[in-house]
Amino acid sequence: MQRPDMSVVLAGIQMRNPVMTASGTFGYGAEFADYLDLESIGAMVTKGLSLKPKAGNPTPRIVETPGGMLNAIGLQNVGIDAFIEQKLPYLKDVNTPVIANLYGNTLEEYGEVASRLDGLAGVAGIEVNISCPNVKQGGIVFGTDPGAAQEVVSLVKRNTSKPLIVKLSPNVTDVVLMAKACADAGADALSLINTLTGMAIDLDRRRPVLANVTGGLSGPAIKPVALRMVWQVAKAVQLPLIGIGGIMNGRDALEFMLAGATAIQVGTASFLDPSAAQRIAGEMEQYLVENGIDNVRSLIGALEV
Amino acid sequence: MQFKSMVISNVEVSPNYFRMRMTAPQELACAVPGQFVMLKVNDAIDPLLRRPFGLFDVGSFVPEYAGCGAQLYCEILYKVVGKGTKLLAALHHGDLVDLLVPLGKGFQMGPAGEEKVLVGGGVGLAPLYYLAKELKERGEKVRLFAGGRNRDDVLCITEFERLGVETYVATDDGTLGERGFVTQVLERHLASGMRIFACGPTPMLNAVAKMSQKHGVPCQVSMEAYMACGVGACLGCVMKGANHSDETPDYRCVCKDGPVFDSFELQWS
Ligand SMILES: Cc1cc2nc3c(=O)[nH]c(=O)nc-3n(C[C@H](O)[C@H](O)[C@H](O)COP(=O)(O)OP(=O)(O)OC[C@H]3O[C@@H](n4cnc5c(N)ncnc54)[C@H](O)[C@@H]3O)c2cc1C
Ligand SMILES: Cc1cc2nc3c(=O)[nH]c(=O)nc-3n(C[C@H](O)[C@H](O)[C@H](O)COP(=O)(O)O)c2cc1C
Ligand code: FES
């Protein structure tokens, strides 16, 4: 049998396979070059970029939990200028699409970062992290209010000509409502899910483990929630979806595709296995071969309910 | 690099302290003392993350099976403190573990002729043994100041002495060596022309860093932090640099910029 066709197109971005790396778990790509072939994966997503460099939170910032981990990195990043000067040149030489993940502390910042990234060769698309508090409006998180999300997405849309992916927060009552708001505002694709807000307590010290008190839960523990959300959104919205949450192997990834995802992102798994993204792409292909499936796209949304 | 390693031996050397020897890739021949490994204790998702351990020793051995040339091994010295290290202690000869090696920046040994002063407590002695071995191979004069809560925390002293290292010991309860902090013993011996290499609990490193500053003796410290990736990607393991402030933040990754730092690079409480 011929090798199965693993390629997908996501909002105009051509990818050799559906495996992307998740923002904040793959640095700026170079950190992993010793461990896998960066040209074996579908796309790379950068650490969340902001207008100015961001220091991030005090430590401890991470703690392991059963089947997962909490992080409160606080979006530490080099800032958009240093990204363009120091990180992008390396990524340009890698023949794999680069998606720039971005966020803002205010509505205006989102627009500014997007316009700085527009027109940059070497950036195939942008992913907007809306799971951030708006410092100007009492810290209400953009991604938990349909009106605020719509405002952010429309503003970014006006400031970019690149494919626009909006990354949804799971910390909402109705993810479909948020997805529809982002779709109406001009998103070309949706990625979900970001981390679930959680907390860990040190009983003996009677203190929270993380300096930030709360953090974002990721890893295998969140996979069922992520699958459910992808499935719900896929039924309600026409946009292509990127499934994220606890994907550890090829089978996990294909489950997300059945639920309706066109592509998937590998996050926490890269910490336990720095070659995870490449391995998962291989395992997906292997599954297709073993099951006589010649095209990975035929699995998108093929869940039988 | 990522390497599937086989456990060669895993021995309890003191109550709750284990010394584990594993097969290592050829690349480890270029490892530097102070560098560390990230070890996945099993294939399961619990515990999820790898665990960091300093290199205690790197050497070569000839495997028992026939037709095989010399091969590299590495060793770690660890204390059982929780879930991961408990599982680690249950491993036997022949079990497989997944390693990322060698990670981080190690100790810079400095010019020949200085007196090299090693200061450690508990498992902090692990990277110092590897360092002492390399320093002794260069014919350097090496002294060790080892501390702990009690005698059980003062590990592998005979091994250090076998290398020809002059050792000084202090324990909180006086069950071995002097009673008190090892840093007090160190202070009595500090003199110019020395170079300090320290690894151990943060309060100890804090004291050593301040003392070295006071006496104008160069000092490197090996730090610990919670780690997820070990390769500089997650930014979970950072420490404050010396000039860090809320306005001009300066965070350093322990896994990538460290774990060994010049003491003046960091902010001490
Ligand atoms: C660069 C580096 C080198 C290290 N070298 C050694 C070594 O040579 N020998 C050795 O025994 N230990 C070493 N450690 C510490 C070791 O990584 C932890 O003890 C280990 O990860 C605990 O795992 P656990 O699952 O048993 O404990 P857990 O169940 O995860 O936690 C148990 C206790 O250990 C503490 N702990 C957990 N992880 C760490 C950590 N990364 N650093 C400090 N404390 C932690 C927790 O606060 C908790 O109190 C090193 C750490 C670093 C960062
Ligand atoms: C340490 C860490 C840092 C992260 N940083 C970002 C970030 O900067 N921007 C973002 O949109 N998501 C960030 N995420 C969320 C991940 O991209 C992903 O959505 C989440 O971890 C769920 O996937 P996983 O279970 O496969 O890790 C981060 C996650 C982790 C664990
Ligand atoms: S452990 Fe991930 S950056 Fe250091």
Image: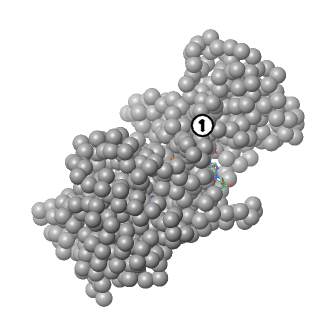
Q: Could you say where residue B165 lies in the image, as x and y percent from the top left?
A: 69, 21
Furthest residue toward top: B113
Work out which quarter of the rendered image holds the N terminus of chain A and state it: bottom left
Task: Say which of A77 and B3 sits in front.
Answer: A77
Q: Could you say where residue A198 lies in the image, as x and y percent from the top left?
A: 56, 69
Q: Could you say where residue B92 lies in the image, as x and y percent from the top left?
A: 56, 50
**Residue B64 visible:** no
Question: Mark 1 sits on what residue?
Answer: B243
> In which quadrant of the rendered view does residue B12 lie?
top right
Q: What residue do we see at 64% from left, 14% from top?
A: B114
> In which quadrant of the rendered view does residue A85 lie?
top left
Above/below status of B42 relative to B30: below
Numbered circles on residues, count: 1
Above/below status of A38 relative to A15: above
Locate residue B232 relative to residue B148 in the image: left or right. Answer: left
Ligand 2 shown in quarter = bottom left
- Give the colour scheme of this rendering: one colour
Task: Say which of A86 and A159 sits in front.
Answer: A159
Q: Could you say where residue A261 lies in the image, as x and y percent from the top left?
A: 29, 73
Above/below status of A40 relative to A151: above
Q: What residue do we see at 71% from left, 62% from top?
A: A207
Furthest residue toward left: A2
The secondary structure type at the circle numbered 1 is loop
**Residue B258 visible:** yes
Locate residue B27 relative to residue A200 in the image: left or right. Answer: left
> In which quadrant of the rendered view does residue B143 lie?
top right
Q: What residue do we see at 37% from left, 45% from top?
A: A81
Number of other residues with Cα within 10 Å of mark 1, as a class: few under 14, some 14 to 19, many 20 or more: few
Type of the residue with mark 1: Asn
